[in-house]
Image (cartoon, rainbow, N blue to C red):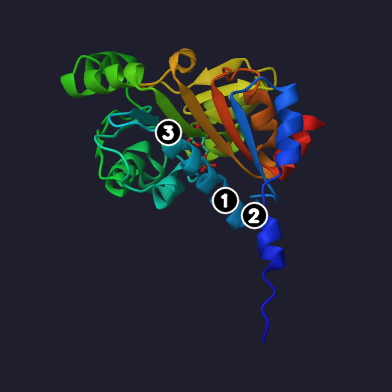
Amino acid sequence: TLINVEPFLTLIENRDDLALQLKEKYSLKDIFVVRGDADHNSLVKEELVRLMAGELTANLLNGTIVSVAGGSTMALVSKFLKPKHDNLLFIPARGGLGEDVALQANSIVSRLAEATSGEHRMLYAPDSISKASLELLKEEPMVREIIDLNKRSSLVIHGIGDALQMASRRNVTPDVISKLENDNAVGEVFGFYFDADGNVVHKVDTIGLQLADLKNKDSIFAVAGGDGKKEAVKAYLKLAPENTILFIDEVIAEHLLG
Ligand code: BG6
């Protein structure tokens, strides 16, 4: 029997034509577009992450420090990395954001280190403690180290989320939800919530990478797929620095061009 693999191959093919049009419109370091809609086919998300892992590998050197955000997209990255460099160090970009443990940056960095025979550090900083305790925590040597490493890292990898979806996944309080609704938050990256114009309207009080740090990095690898994230990605591009490498699917790419 002949198995028709064609639909499969078409599905994961890259859309270089869309990427080219987007590069004319947005000044980013690079843009990759995968065919399809990640909300309807999980292979699309895998393909986005596989592509990103390939580009990330090409940018790694011995001893590179990588700041890593959480989420289900980042949780797939370790699947596609191999031990090709020495002394890689993966660090959580920020402290607890209220995610399930498997989706927390702490878990993801440990898997990335295992996949690459590299190292990782954990950041034990819960997201719902008082400002005073947070300030005290920042003085702890182990926490200080992560803060410093996030300043020194040359690469960042992160996902992009829809604001209200992320807030409800993280079980934030009803007053935060109303604040996000009132301020028209549409997107979220590592604890920063922003509106359609790219203004930050809310930020989770935790430790680590700040949006202002991004412009000092060599490259930022941002990955998002699925129709439900199209407004979030469009808004994020208003605040993403030019050293961003964007990995999106066709459904988001078309929205960005529209
Ligand atoms: C994370 C970011 O990397 O990905 C979040 O820290 C973002 O801020 C999230 O919203 C998206 O999550 P997911 O599960 O859709 O990959």
Which quadrant: the N terminus? bottom right
Q: Residues within 10 Å of mark 2 (few under 14, many from 20)?
A: some
Q: Is mark 3 within 8 Å of ligand 1?
A: yes
Q: Secondary structure at mark 1?
A: helix
In the image, is the residue at mark 1 within 8 Å of ligand 1 by its beta carbon? no
Residue extending furthest toward the bottom? 1
Residue 12 got which mark? 2
With respect to residue 36, does 192 lie above or below? above
> What amino acid is found at the position of numbered circle 2 in the picture?
Ile
Query: Is there a contact, CB below 8 Å, between mark 1 and mark 3?
Result: no
Q: Which sits earlier in the primary sequence, circle 3 or circle 2?
A: 2
- Amino acid carrying mark 1 in the image: Glu
The spot of residue 14 in percent (x, y) is: 67, 47
The answer to which of 172 and 223 lies nearer the viewer is 223
Question: At x 20% / y 14%, what residue is drawn?
Answer: 139
Q: Toward which corner of the image does residue 42 lie, by quadrant? A: bottom right
Q: Which mark is residue 47?
A: 1
Circle 3 Cα neighbour tier, 10 Å, few/some/many (<14 / 14–19 / ≥20): many
Tell me the residue that label 3 is attached to. Answer: 69
Expressed as whole percent of the image width and height from the top left, the position of residue 151 reads 34, 16
**Residue located 30% across and 19% down the image:** 147
Instruction: Specify few, some or many for label 1: CA neighbours under 10 Å numbering under 14, 14-19, or 20 or more.
Output: many
Looking at the rendered image, the disc whose residue lies closer to the viewer, 1 or 3, is: 1
Q: Nearer the viewer, residue 25 or 186?
A: 25
Locate the C terminus and report the quarter of the image it occupies.
Answer: top right
Which numbered dot is residue 13?
Answer: none
Q: Earlier in the sequence, mark 1 or mark 2?
A: 2
